[in-house]
Image (cartoon, coloured by chain):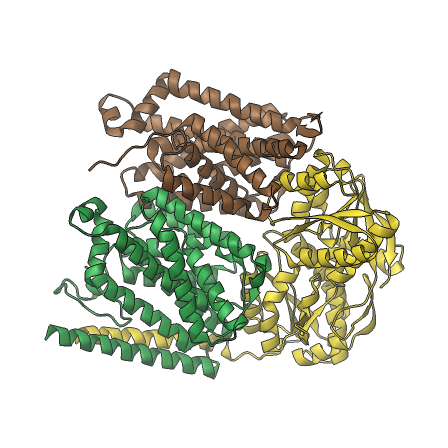
Chain colours: A yellow, B brown, C green
Amino acid sequence: MRKKKVAGVFMSLMVAAGVMAGCGSANTSGDGDKDGVIKIGANLELSGGVASYGQSIKEGIELAFEEINKEGIDGKKLKLVPFDNKSDAPEAINGATKLISQDKVAAIIGAATSGNTKAQIEIAQSNSIPLLTPTGTSADVTVNKGKLNDFVFRTCFIDPFQGTVAANFAAKELNVKTAAVFIDSASDYSKGLAASFKELFTKMGGNVVIEEAYLAKDTDFHAQLTNIKGKNPDFIFVPGYYEEVGLIVKQARELGLKVPMMGADGWDSPKLVELAGKDALNNTFITNHYSSGDSDQKVQDFVKAFKAKYKDKSPDAFNALGYDSAYFIADAIKRAGSSDPKKIQKALAETDGLELITGKMKLDKNHDPIKAAVILEYQNGEQTFKTKVNP
Amino acid sequence: MEQFIQQLVNGISIGSIYALIALGYTMVYGIVKLINFAHGDVFMVGAFIGFYSITIFHLGFFPALLISMAACAIFGVLIERIAYKPLRNATRIAALITAIGVSLFIEYGTIYVRGAQLESYPDDIVPLKNFDIFGVTISGKSILILAVSICLMIVLQFIVHKTKIGKAMRAVSHDMDAARLMGINVNNTISATFAIGSALAGAAGVVFGMYYTKIEPLMGIIPGLKAFVAAVFGGIGIIPGAMTGGLILGVIEALVSAVGGSLWRDAVAFVVLILILIFRPAGLLGKNVREKV
Amino acid sequence: MNLLKKAKGFWGTIVLVVIFSVVTQLLINGGTLNSFYVNTLFSIGINIILAASLHLIIGVTGQFSIGHAGFLAVGAYASAIITMKLGLPFPVAILAGGAAAAIAGLIIGIPTLRLRGDYLAIATLGFGEIVKIVFLNIDYIGGASGMTVTHLTTWPWLIACVVITIVVIVNFTNSTHGRACISIRENEIAADAMGINTTFYKVMAFIIGAFFAGVAGALHAHNFYIIQPPNFGFLKSFDILILVVIGGLGSMSGAVIAAIALTIISTFLSSYPEVRMVIYSLVLIVMMLFRPQGLMGSKEITSFLKLGKAAKGGVHNDGKNTVA
């Protein structure tokens, strides 16, 4: 009988512990508005594979929050609650859960990549918390099987747009007839871009002669590049992330592939130049959200403020989009006149004509911003502004 | 045809890196019968030591290679003395778990100390040209890698078969207790094995950095596993076996990619491993030994 | 008489478990436990199933398998296909996940279980990686970008699966078959000589272990919203292995306690991502150096509670039973 007693005591202890654990946070309010502070979560890739995106976005947000908090929003200040999702989808889910239930944030900014953003959608939807991804460019982030995820927003344009801009540029400006497509099979982003590139490029009379694939974290691409070289394309489209793209460009040049190569915003990192080397990067192009070389006054002010805060570092597109995301949310909170997540969501959806660094913000019915893209060329390791493409 | 030869060349380049790591693996396994999971991480540490000696102390490729080998040798002995020696008579499972623990510790310790971000080896450390032979591009670097691996293999073969310490190693690997009874200092012999094996891993790290540019704290995991596959492939404990295994594995991978299976490359390596283990557990160059009661 | 007492103890346990789960369910419904704690609770449950299933393979049968995440992945994907693609109910998915993993266990078990020790370890590790790569390359289930899964894992399903897993594995261990498995762990050659069909029992333990890992996979898939092949790499296998080893090889209650404790510790350490893995690995090394048999050794919690009394068949509140 003694056994049972012990068991009973043990069990009641466990239940008691459960109750106490729950009590700790059960009494806080749910709207993120306390003592004149509005909490905004940032669920970002601060470490792991694409750490440089998350860190850049965070820098941008922090600069923007500093500026916004000088005046405050109706006397309230914004407070950033960062969470490191380690570039990992399950961690992103943990992060969203923690930010919503523990920190009671009014909205979440993040994640940098489409995959990690998608992981959080269901949590954001079921808790009615706005989720704003600065750089999640995959088309199905905001729309899932024809249904709008009404709490999900983004600050950037979408993959199909980038893919078509690239196809247009390749066919018209570079005048290439045959292209190779080399994708990261581990990323939706890469697949999405490749699909829209292929569609438009073939429609414009071009011919995709070979498609090869790799997986994130690979280091040896010689075998695939040899296959590509065998088909002799005029142009190679590599919509991937900088960590692998750097090596791909380098190894391609080593194998004697001298043709122009092109990618998208995933290339945008100073690490790319270190990995590929300045010479190998010549004759490569990217589509991007913004260029620090743009002569627009607003852009130049931002570049100046950014350089002042971050030791003369020139802001990249991720810095700019992080900064813009912060203003995007701040504007919505101001118009909503409240830190209630549902009202913020409504205000975000109604955004029209907001002037941001990366262009004028207007959302279409799918919560996708309609705005311009820029094309940059690498020359001796520097990004140089080529053209601006309006949608 | 050109393309086929080019793929062979690609395979041999990557294979020689596997071979270099596998040499160390096979030595350690041969003597203490322990899968040293940390070997891949010693390889990573070697790559970083090489990187810092080149970027901070402005050394050339060969001095950096030697420094990295020396530092890794010491590191390897430390690992053995602290983590593995107390477990020499423990169960296999305890030793293997410790090896996994050491491996994780080195990986995440490195991340803790310097962050997870990647580094890139400077491009100009070895000014080697690429050769174009009948349309096949052979990079100077891959020839260098192959040369370094073959040299180190010959040195290793010499040490194991012609020197006194090599004799002791062979004796210890054959029967540890009998060797001790014969007056061989088993502890020192095992430490020497770890020193040599880790030095090879360090060399592989620097060579890898030079060839592939990108190094990061978790870079050792996959090459480490592949090298183990290579070691098993060639017959574990056999030095020329590790070399052959590494080269064959590299070529298999390149050919799989050549026929359009680049996404299946890693799977093929492991399938090869399982097939070898089932049909020829002693490896290509090994002799089958039946377990006696 | 003894049997009656045993049976009473068993049902007493079940009643206690039911009370515990009802109370927890009320706490969840009442909102006392917020979703962060619920999430942790679910992770604990899933980890208990994983630890228990690997315990059967490593702790009881002594087969050193480090590809357990492979079975987890098979279960996760099979169950996700059942609910998301075929639209069948969740219980079917749990069973299908288990069954698919069991079949995978059979396929991989028959050839590789001829291997011993380190070779088996490496072969199973290879198997885990192959499973991951296969899923990466199938577009039907989303390829590398993974598959989104509806959240269907609820507390009653979870606790029911945990209890069933523990009861089945404990009873298996104490049956004739379980004894045969233990004899293989102690000395395979001797077991062979005694007329035990070692291959049969090894494969059997492997299949049962794989089945429950598959069940855990089903619960995992329907708890975490998204499943991606990279989540099931060998680091995940190591995580499961660590639970079993820290708990004590051969101790069921040890595995369960380790699963609870480590999940909680790891959740709280997640705010300090940079030190988490360092601490984790140090604990592992220190543990192996100073207490290689794990927390509980091969003892069960009941043998401590009884304080040296008669060592026969005690039953503990969680249905944890003694092995020896």
Q: Which residue lies furthest to the front in this view?
A: B1
Q: Residue at the location (58% across, 72% down)?
A: A123
Q: Residue C226: where, in percent of width, then height?
A: 55, 65
Please determine whether, in this image, residue A196 is positioned above or below residue B47. Answer: below
Residue C128 drawn at (x, y percent)? 45, 52
Image quadrant for the C terminus of chain A? bottom right
Q: Does the image show residue B204? A: yes
Quadrant into which the N terminus of chain A falls: bottom left
Q: Is residue B278 left or right of residue B150?
A: left
Quarter location, residue C48? bottom left
Q: Can residue C41 be seen in this view?
A: no
* Residue C185 pos. (x, y %): 24, 50
Image vertical order of residue A388 relative to residue C48, above or below: above
Q: Which residue is drawn at 74% across and 37% down?
A: A257
Q: Residue C213: where, in percent of width, then height?
A: 39, 62
Q: Nearer the viewer, residue C96 or A128?
A: C96
Q: In the picture shown, does residue C247 fall above or below B262? A: below
Q: Which residue is drawn at 50% across and 31% down?
A: B19
Please, which residue is most extreme toward the left here?
C1
